[in-house]
Amino acid sequence: MATIHILADHLVSQIAAGEVVERPASVVKELVENALDAGASEIRVELESGGKRRIKVIDDGCGLEKDDTLLAFDRHATSKIANFEDLERVGTLGFRGEALASIAAVARVELLTSTGGEEGHRVRIEGGRVKVTEPAARARGTTVEIASLFFNVPARRKFLKTPQTEMRKCVEVVQGYALARPDVRFGLSHEGRTLLDALDCGSGFEALRQRIGQIFGQKLSDHLVAVAPDGGEAPEIGGFVGDKETTRGRRLFVYVNRRLIRDRAVLATFYRAVREEWKGEDYPALFLFLDIPPEEVDVNVHPQKAEVRFRDSKLTFRLSQTLRRALAEARGEEAAPLREIGGEGGAAGFASESPVYGAGPGGQPTFVWQGLGERRSPTETGAWEVREGSDSASSAGAPFGGAPSSGDLGSDGVLSGNRLATPTYSPPQRSIVPLSGRSGEPRPFRLLGQYKGTLILLEGPDGLYLIDQHVAHERILYERLRRTLARESTPSQALVTPILLDVSKSEALRLTELAPRLADSGFELVPMSGDTIALARLPAVLSSEEAERILLSLAQESGGDGIDLAQSLLDALAANLSCRNAVKMHHPLHADEMEALVAELFTAEQPYACPHGRPIVLKMTDSDLERRFGRR
């Protein structure tokens, strides 16, 4: 007897449904996409029990003809594509013909549709089996009602979360498409309570900003800077990026042809642009819209169409350049102007403070800060030394030719030509710093000194070690605070004037859901009118800005009911406090302070990364250095 057999049609449909329908939010997504493809100008979504009991989507789109009502529920039945060439240039949100068939296989479905003619049509399907097909009255458009999701797949139904969590996921889906289509009115209600009512804002760039204000509040909208191409270099890229005030909540939305996606390459480009332009890890809000010819993007690479692939390999480069310009504008800084330096015939450069050696009154050596004209003597700086002497002095330790001779100085006493003064840093001859680390075996390191008040340099047995002093101190404080906070209750303080958090509906639902557990950690949240949440009490160790940042981060998390909120808050509190109190960059440290910091760092549980994931230690091995100098 053969061991391989063909599965029954109803079982195949249930298996296929698992790829498309995960939870009520998946159903809402597919039905809203169908409504938008049908040209709807108004879409209403009604939920019961977070969508587990009932989902109803009503639109005023083109509707379906009588002959198409039953055919729409067959697998791979679609009006969007007809051949492979159509698949290569898909311009609609849906195209596979799997959504309605998958939903009907695991729920009780009623479809009421009309093209605006004399009569409409109604179809009822239960678990993939047609129960009713009859004429019915309706204005132009379509109504799809889904009841008892996963009624015939109890194992899948058990994995659904609480009604509050499922409702919040549905709100996130509707919000996402409302942002993409400001020209469409979106309404969302749960058991008769209105959750979202986004009016038609029209089309255009400012309509997008207005829709963002409708959903996230006018305060966020006022802190957005347009992401616009420069000189027509990237006309397919547009949207908005926030300023420093928007870093408290991670609101990142990326659309390709108005399809909400989760593309790691695009987000990685954004993160890299922020790090390079802002020199930090605080990411602002992003609403990015990529309008790309359909033939230049492949949307058929993910079961839920949440990821895409770009055929233009240069798109990420154009995106990076466009984002960096917008981030520079959002930062509120302008590039330094160019000016002529060094008199007539000098090369153009930035008006920066570059030290150049010259001769002062009485022939005493000084150096001039170009652009400011300020002269200082070496004794005033304590960091630079002019080496007197000839080539022999240069070979003894002046790699750039030693001090300038009188022949090298111009009439104004400024060093001419390309010669540089020789800075000397005499590293202190310190004793070996015994660093044991987690292995318990001591490793001999010698402290060389500090680079620009930022990096601590160590000579190790196998190479040169560079330690970021701020990140290292942050790791040390983080582990200290975690141990302290874990064994003590967090004291809280009441605010005379509560802080009002302007959040979206999904964020407000998330914070309301977490409010009882947040109270155990010192937070008191009070729901206000609309989507506003008032912060009336916060942990005493936090400032109001840090508390707001933590709450907005929690509101953006996609975790469900099972997250360890106490541990998440403990980590967030310790990370924020340690970053705030750690020694800053460009801060000079004494040799004893550097030794103490490095010694404690290598006894930490994790001495190689800060709480935010940034590296602490950079190692350059002897072989790396030899290769750099061409010795290998």
Image (spheres, rainbow, N blue to C red):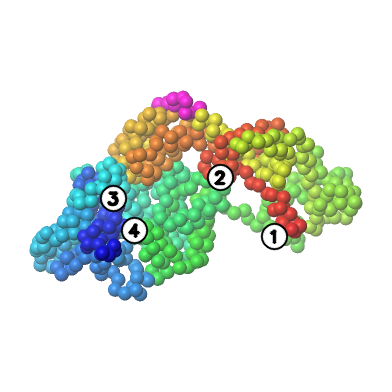
Inspect the image, locate mark 3, and give the three-letter code of the amino acid beneath it. Answer: Arg
Where does label 1 land, which residue?
Answer: 348
Inspect the image, locate mark 1, and give the three-letter code of the amino acid beneath it. Answer: Ala
Where's the N terminus, which quadrant? bottom left
> How many angstroms separate mark 3 from mark 4 (CA)?
12 Å
Between discs 4 and 2, the one toward the N terminus? 4
Check contact, mark 3 vs mark 4: CB within 8 A.
no
Marker disc for residue 73: none
- Horizontal relation, residue 228 to residue 470: left or right: left
- Which quadrant of the view contains residue 120? bottom left
> How many angstroms separate mark 1 from mark 2 (CA)?
37 Å
Q: Classify mark 2: residues with Cα within 10 Å, few (<14), some (14-19) or many (20+).
A: few
- Which quadrant of the view contains residue 80? bottom left
Marker disc for residue 23: 3
Residue 361 location (% of width, % of height): 85, 44
Assign a secondary structure to mark 3.
Answer: loop
- Which quadrant of the view contains residue 607? top right
Marker disc for residue 614: 2
| Residue drawn at x 63%, y 34% as measured from the top left | 440
